[in-house]
Amino acid sequence: MPKKNCFHCGLDCKNNQYQIEEKLFCCNGCKTVYEILHQSELGCYYDFEKNPGTIPMEIKGKYNYLDTKEIADKLLEFNDDETSVVSFYTPNMHCSSCIWVLENLDKLHSGIVTSSVNFPQKKIRITFKNEKITLKNVVELITSIGYEPYISLEDADSGKHKSNKTLIYQIAIAGFGFGNIMLLSFPEYFQSDEFWLDKYKPLFRFLMFAFSVPVVFYSAKDYFISAYKGVKHNMLNIDVPIVLGISVLFIRSTIEIVFDLGQGFFDSLTGLVFFLLLGRIFQQRTYNYLSFERDYKSYFPIAVTKIEKGVEQAIEVFKVKEGDRLLIRNEELIPVDGILINGNATIDYSFVTGESIPVSKQSGDKLFAGGKQLSGAIEMDVLQSVQQSYLTQLWSNDAFKKENNLGIKNLVDTLSKYFTYIILIIALLAGVFWFFTDKTMIFHIVSSILIIACPCALALSAPFALGNILRIFGRRKFYLKNANGIEQAAKIDTIIFDKTGTITTNADANITFEGTRLLVAEEQGIRNLIRSSNHPLNRMLYSTLPIAKELEVGKFKETLGKGIEGVINGDLYVLGSASFVKGKATNKNETTIFVSINGEIKGRYIFKNSYRKGLQTVFEKLAKIYNLIILSGDNEGEKEYLQTILPKGTVFAFNQKPEDKLEFIKEKQKQGNHVLMIGDGLNDAGALAQSNFGIAISENTNVFSPACDAILDANKFTQLPKFLQLTKQTIKVIKASFVLSFFYNIIGMYFAITGQLTPIIAAILMPLSSITIVIFVTILTNFISRKRN
């Protein structure tokens, strides 16, 4: 009896056999994986070799050097022995189907946790489990499905990669072939009866054929490869019509020459490829120009505390350099790789890996950028300067994405999905019509239709409009996590504000102490304890207390919305609400922090809040469009004052715990409201995550939170109404660009169907339409942003 192996894993099925059609599987797990792969259009996994799931022979051993730890460490962005993160430049990535395949690598191998693509930079970022797959295996996997990464250790150190000149070579060959074929075609154009021209006409035609071969099989190969991969994955991508046009022209022309029926269309064919490639490089240059040094990530403002000669100062993250000493407070993000010097480090690397299991680190251990400190303050020495794009990429980790209904993205995806089918049907109908009208026009018309109709303009309008507005927001210190947030912000109808640290400011706060006079040592202990905290009230108090010598804080614990505690020189310090320190609440409605030392209530700090400048104006503008709510964990002490300065109809809810805020937002959403939550990014993490769109206010603090969708510099608080209005205007620009894109295709299709458009002209117009749309949305978004400045 012949041995029966599992179609998925290749193992002997033995007695356990599951069957789909003629394919056997050794277990239900393998059968399920097979079904998922085929449902996800990833059946190519089984085409790697004769044995399914294995690596092709031609790349076996090619990447053995990646098993060397020293080399792997240069390439890995993160490695905590369990999980690793790596980014690769993949030049073969060039269409939407490429993105889909590369972002679903976890379906090809269980060791891969996530994979995300940066299409403009042709980069893929992969998170994987070291126990299940190695770096070498990861590279072999993506190479085996056609996306070999460009790996250079020199580039790994510099963060750059050498430019790929293949496109230049392809254009040069296409241009050479096109020029020579045009010269050889002149006698045919003029229909000359000269003896020598007639005698050597077969030679000229053969030369035209010879010049066209490298143009089709080298210069145009990327179109064929892309179309083949699309068809292989049961998708008709935008390159399929172009390949059909090129193939039809080449086959028809070859038949005419072989059977001496005519000169063919080699001039049109090579001209088509030449102008397509020229358009592609023109597109790349245009997009690069529009994007040059305007990426919003370069404006990211995340602040960090630097310690220099015992003095703490908040600096912008891009000013951090190797050798600096940084103070990382509780719940703050580690912005750079470094070495732990002081403190108890419990690091949450969920920004990097998507998993929130904290890991403990000892003095001398390496800390990776992207970790979040969870147990008080630590000090670290910096190993390298910050990479802001890396930080923002962590912030945009798929693990923290909200499930939102994105109308524009869904619309574009739906249209793109059926676009090629519609074009093929139109081309077929036009071909049938011209077959009965004028057979000589069929190939020109069908080719023109297949080439001129391209959804590129439609697909590019939204990304460039959203990308440009992201950069505009970034320059104005309003930092969005991703472009999808613009559409969500445009749908908002209800805005909820936290109070402390959101509509109040740390500057100019009036703080007094009421209770038993504190000893100098006790004040020093309090300052050292709140040094670890990021809460707005604690930060305000920290800045007013006298500078004290650094003391070790043990057993630090922060309970969100309640208070903090820790042991200093054997004494237990507890700071927070009256109930948290087990004190007696007063009848006065005031913002306070109670102080308890070794179980004895020493007194309380009383805060007279200072509200942000322009608060009243901001609320008056917002009240015209949105429902406004103040949702605070503080008591009602300042409700009466707020009612006098804020618009009528503003809803107030005080004494709200973090879980109460989250439930409040859920209830609003059940009522059909689209909620924007604005908070401090710490106590409001749950509310920010639950809201349709969440903004964290940044005031010289590291509020880098996965829960928020945007970070607003506190100094730009008065610009909030303009920012929100601009999101609505941007959606209108995108819709206008859709109309313009359809107009392009309809007009171009009309001229192609009626025979007034040649394939070469179509090849010129196709990239120009995309470029026009990109320029249109860029100029218009710049205009509306200046108009509202």
Image (spheres, rainbow, N blue to C red):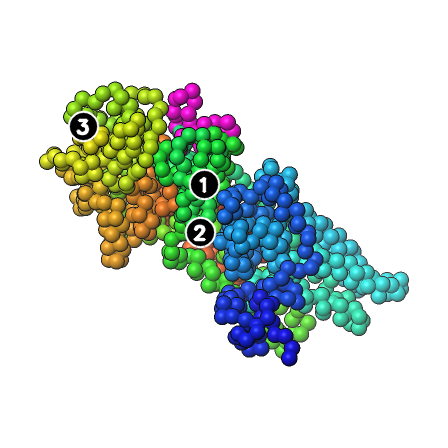
Give the vertical position of 547 relative to 774 (above or below): above
Magenta-colored span: 306-328
Q: Quadrant of residue 3?
A: bottom right
In 3D space, how far apart are the residues under numbered discs 1 and 3 (Cα atoms)? 39 Å
Q: Rounded to the nearest whole Å, what is the CA distance between mark 1 and mark 2?
A: 14 Å
Residue 577 locus on image (x, y percent): 20, 37
Which image quadrant for residue 564?
A: top left
Q: Which of 492 and 447 is in front in this view?
A: 492
Mark 1 surroundings within 10 Å by alpha-carbon count, few (fewer than 14), some (14 through 19), many (20 or more):
many
Q: Mark 1 points at which residue?
A: 370
Residues at circles 1 and 2 in contact by the CB criterion of under 8 Å? no
User: In the image, what residue occupies the spot 56% across and 53% down?
Assistant: 133
Local secondary structure at mark 3: strand
Identify whether 311 is placed above or below 224: above
* First of labels 2, 3 by sequence position: 2
Disc nearest the viewer among 1 and 3: 3
Q: Quick one: which residue is furthest to the left in this view?
A: 587
Q: Residue 789 carries which label?
A: none
| Image coords of residue 423 (percent x, y) | 55, 67
Q: Mark 3 points at which residue?
A: 602
Which badge, 1 or 2, is on the more N-terminal residue? 1
Residue 409, given in percent of the width and then of the height, sits at: 44, 57
Residue found at x 32% / y 45%: 685
Q: Mark 2 points at which residue?
A: 398
In 3D space, how far apart are the residues under numbered discs 2 and 3 (Cα atoms)?
47 Å
Q: Say which amino acid is labelled 3.
A: Lys
Which of 582 and 431 lies nearest the eye of the viewer?
582
Image check: 773 left or right of 244? left
Element under label 2? Answer: helix
